[in-house]
Structure formats: C-alpha cells, structure tokens
Image (cartoon, grey):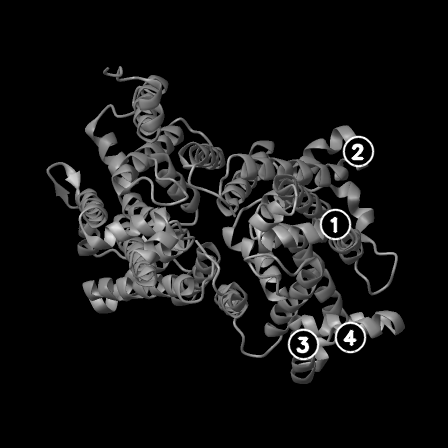
Amino acid sequence: MRESIPSREWLQRNLNTIIPVSGLILLLIGLRIANPYFLASWDSVITLVYGMSFFLVAACGLTLVILMGSFDFSVPSVLKLSAMIFAVLYPSLGFLSIPAALAVSLVFGFVNGLLLARFNIPSFMATLATSMIAEGAAQVISGGYTRMITDPAFRALSTTMIAGLPSIFYWAIAIWLISIFLTFVTPFGRAIYAVGGNLVGARLAGINVKMVRILTFMVCSLFAGLSGILYASQIQAGHMQVGVLDMIPLFASVVVGGTALTGGVGGVHRTLLGVLIIRWLDSGLSMLAIDLNVRMIVFGVIAIVMAILTIDRRRIKIMK
Amino acid sequence: MSGNLRRGAVTLPILTSAWRLIRGNPAIWAILGLLIIFSSIVPERFLSSGNLIAILKNFAVTSMLAVGPTFVILLGSIDVSYMGIWMFGGALVWLLYPYLGLASIFIYPIFGLLIGLFNGVLHVKAKIPSFILTLAMTAVLAFLTTYVRNISGVLTLTVPAYNFLRESPIPYLPSPFLLALPTIAISIFLMFFTKLGTYLCAIGSNEEGAKLAGINVEKYKVLAFMFSGFLVGLGSIAIFVHLGNQTRVDFDPSELVRGLAAIVLGGTPLAGGMGGPHRTLLGALVYVLIFNGLFLLPGVDPNHLKLYIGALLLGAVVIASKALKGALIA
C-alpha cells in the first residue's frame, strides 16, 4: 500500500525542511505585500545580497561547530578582529595582510578546539573567554578608532560586479559549496556528523575525536576570519562595531535552517535557507522602519522556537 | 580525617568548620594573596577608605549577578539570563512606578522568579540546552529594555524616588552592600539548611543515580532555575541602587563574563555536583580585588581591560578543568 505523500509521518519526518522553505515563501509574500518596493528592482536584490553574503560565510563555520554538538561564541569577535587586522595592516602590507588575519583567526580556532578537546572545558565557556581576548586584541591594535581604507583595490575584493552581482556573493557561495563538499564527501565531514550524533559511539568507532574537534573549530574560525575580511572590504573599513550584534542572528540562521542544537542533525546546505530567511527578514523589517531592538527580539524568539522544533528528543537522555 | 572531624564537631564546631572552609576553598588563599600584594605595592591608594568602599560596592554588584546562577551550575547546567533579568526588571520598575509607587521595586524578585520558572520549564520539558535558552532569553530581555528606553523618549530609566535607599545607615558600609545581604543570607540558607542544596549536588554529579534514588529530578531542576531567577531579581535591587536608581539600557554580551567568572573563580566546577553560593561569594571577591588592584598599579592601560578579563577567565576555567576529567562535554 502506498502512503499518500503529505501523510502525518512524512510531515513529521520532513518538518526541519518544510518550516524553513514555507517560512521563506511566506516571508517573501508578506514583505512584498507590506512594502511594494521590496525586491522591486535589481538594485534591491544587490542590497539583499550585500546583506547576506558575509553572514553566510560566518554561518557556515558556526553550522559545522553546532553539527558537532558544540557552540562557538567567539565567531563575531574573531570576525571583528580579522576585519581589524586586515584594515590596520593593509597600508603597510597590502594584500599580504589577508594571510596574517586568517592566521590569527586559525590560532583562535585552534585554542578553542584545544580547550574543549584537551582540557575538557565546555565549548561555550571556552569560546566566551577567547571571544573576550579577541575583542580586547581588536581594541588594542586599533586603539578603538575606525580604520578607513580608501584604496579602490581594497574594496574591489568584495564589490567587483560579475554578471550583475558583487563578487562577495561568489565568495560566499564558494565557501558554502566547499563546506557542503567538506561535510558530505570527505571523511572529516562524516566524522563531524558522527561526533555530533554520538560522541561515545564515534570514539569507539575509532574516530580521533580530539583531532576532529580541534579541526572543526579551526575551520569555523577560519570562515569567521574570512567573513571579517570580506566585510571589511565591503564597508571599506574595520571598526569596533563590526559583529557586535551578530551573535543572535547568526545562531538563529543556523537553527532556522533546520540544524539541531544537539548535533548530528541538519547540515551546511540548510544554512543558506536560514541565512536568507534571517537576513531578508532583517532587511524587510528595517525597510519598514522597525526598530533594531525589535528585530533582535524577533530573532531571539525565532531562535528559541526553532530550537524547540528541531531538537531530536528521542536520542537525548540527559540535557544539561 | 573523619575522626578529626567528629572530634571537632563535638568540641569546637565553629573553629573546625572555619578550618574546613579555608582548606576546601583555594579562593581564600587567593584573596589573602591579592590583599597582601596590592597593599604592599600601592598601600596608600589601595587601603584608602574610598577604595575599600568601592571594593565593597563592586563586590555587591558582582556577587548579586553570580549567586543565583550558582544553583543552576550545581546541576551542571548554566543560566546566563541574569543580564536580562537585571536589565528588564529595572525597566519594569520604571514602567510600574507611576502605578504602584515605592512598592514597584518588589517587581524585581517577582519578575526574576517568573523568568526562572519559564526557563526551567522550557529546559526540562522541551529539552533545550540551558546555555542557548538562557542566552536567547537574556538577549530578548536586554533588547526589550533598550526598546522601552527608545520609545519612551528618555535618556535613562531613572526612578529618583528611591534616592533614600542610597543613604547608608551605617558608616563605611555602602548601601548596595547592605542591600545585597538578604540575597546572600537566603542563598546560604537554601544551600545549607534545606534539602535543595544536597539534591542539586546529587543531580549534578549523577543524574541517573539521583533519579534512581527517588529524587524528583525535573521538579528540582525547575526549582533551581526559579531560585536562580528569584535571587538575581532580589540582588538586582542592590545593583539598581548602586547605578543611581536606574538600570543598564545597552546590552554588551561580554558583560556576561562577570557573573560566570565569579562562579568559576570561586571553585564551582561547570560540570556541577559540588561547590555552592558560599564559594561564589569568595570568587566574586577575588574578581573584584583583581580588577580593583590592577588598575591602581602604575602603567596598566584601561584600554586592555577586556584582554585581562578574557585571560583571567581562560586561566580560571583551565585550572577548574581538573574537576571535569572524564566528563562528556559538548
């Protein structure tokens, strides 16, 4: 007997996909009705693309860590520090400042991973501490000033138009595709799912859990650093307000895509949907002149509701 | 050792428990060390009465943020909703003052209790990781506070009618410190004179075992979150008065560190099962002494503050991580 397609079981099994997709469609229709200028011209499409691209890069990294069942609080701070290093060193080093910024980001990822894997410190606590250090370092190297870079080559990294869209969009999509490749094709990616799905089982299956954890945090921080570089290039400066309000929307976009907080369920491919929903909602609401604080409240509530809906409760015995 | 304790418990209970307290709490050695170091390097600035009063005030603020969440950390969970309760509770006091008069300050503990109940039920029933849940809660409440400020068209949410609370009846003891004492007393009472403290430690060290021993784990988890919220709400009155009868209106996630650092420095491990509010009080004193003394030293740049806080927290969690050996940590 064939079951009818929209059966109860099918709905339940695909809830994590149905909610983001229908949410995105409803969002587009709603914003279009509320504001006739939303997505009315190609320029507005480009604005939306600028709003979501750097965000997608950072969200891909955070997704990997959440898939592994951990959490990285330091993503916005590493993003800020990397943007700052890029902008501060650019006048003397030119584009050689990119590897410098990425190297510092990698060090932060390594320390985060080491604190979790070697010292057994809960990841949110370890990354809270390293995020303070990253914030402090950004403050020290910039002196708290905004570093403007007026060199056109600096901006070209993110704003060169290719086929009607800015280059930062292609960077973001490339990172997104690389992350999908990483999680679905490479042994490392499968190990991330294994560690997130069942830590003890992964260890017994012979996976080097410590190595996987350290590497995942390093990839996450690398993407955060890259996102900071692209964002600095997009806004032509590095300053202390970069990334300050990004933690809640970043986290919301990962869970809205359907990646469960408990790890092992979801994937980077879903994060694109989540980023689209959160950033388009953000742009749409700000075009309607909704207060920034209200938008943040909306994201916080969305994050909690989606976290409740996506967590796979059958596997959990003890929730800390 | 047990014989020692039994003999002591009959003859000199206070002295013995005092010795046990010192031996079991390395934070006391840290406090003594910091006091000696700072009073020998910068005696005239560190030991001035103004500075000592400032230390007491800062101790009240830091410990009031940290004492309540300690009960949740005993479970091995975490509660960072204190920023939200403190910020939005103050906005509620400001909003309700025209209707309730001076009684509106009591909205603080009631609001904290309700948020704690909400957190606890959601954590236990919907099984959301407590850190994420309470972080989102803090963010929502904090941005709500800023929003209230923005739409009301005032710069700060100040209630001048509470100015009488700022006058301390006892010289040299600032009023925020006196206002913090009830919260400290309640937390110590809950920890040592009710079964709550024992049960929370049991759940934190072995949840399955606690369940098998007949403890209603879900009920006590919700209770821990409720008392956490209640104590933060009650303690926030002291912070409210300290800040000049107003609440903070702009949210900085890095402020979360203050409460967590006090808990970790005091020696309550993040995996739960041991420690308690008495340790958190010591941890808060360590935290306050370090940052009070540090910026009295010549050549310390306040611009580097976050760097030092991060390094201190990192060092504290690494040292405390010995207690986490073998635990399964996410």
Foreground tag (1 vs 2): 1
Q: Earlier in the sequence, mark 3 or mark 4?
A: 4
Query: Which labelled disc corresponds to residue B29?
Result: 3
Indicate the secondary structure of the residue bearing disc 4.
helix
Residue indicated by mark 2? B101
Residue type marked 4: Gly
Which residue does the numbered mark 4 point to in the structure image? B3
Chain holding disc 2: B
Q: How far apart are marks 2 and 3 (CA)?
A: 46 Å
Under mark 1, the amino acid is Lys
Question: Tag 1, which chain?
Answer: B
Q: Which of marks 3 and 1 is nearer the N terminus?
A: 3
Residues indicated by labels 3 and 4 sit on the same polypeptide chain: yes
A12 relative to A102, above or below = above
**Along the line of sight, the residue nearer the viewer: B259 or B7:** B7
The secondary structure type at the circle numbered 3 is helix
Residue B60: give its label. Answer: none
How far apart in space, not on screen, are marks 3 and 4 (Cα)?
Answer: 26 Å
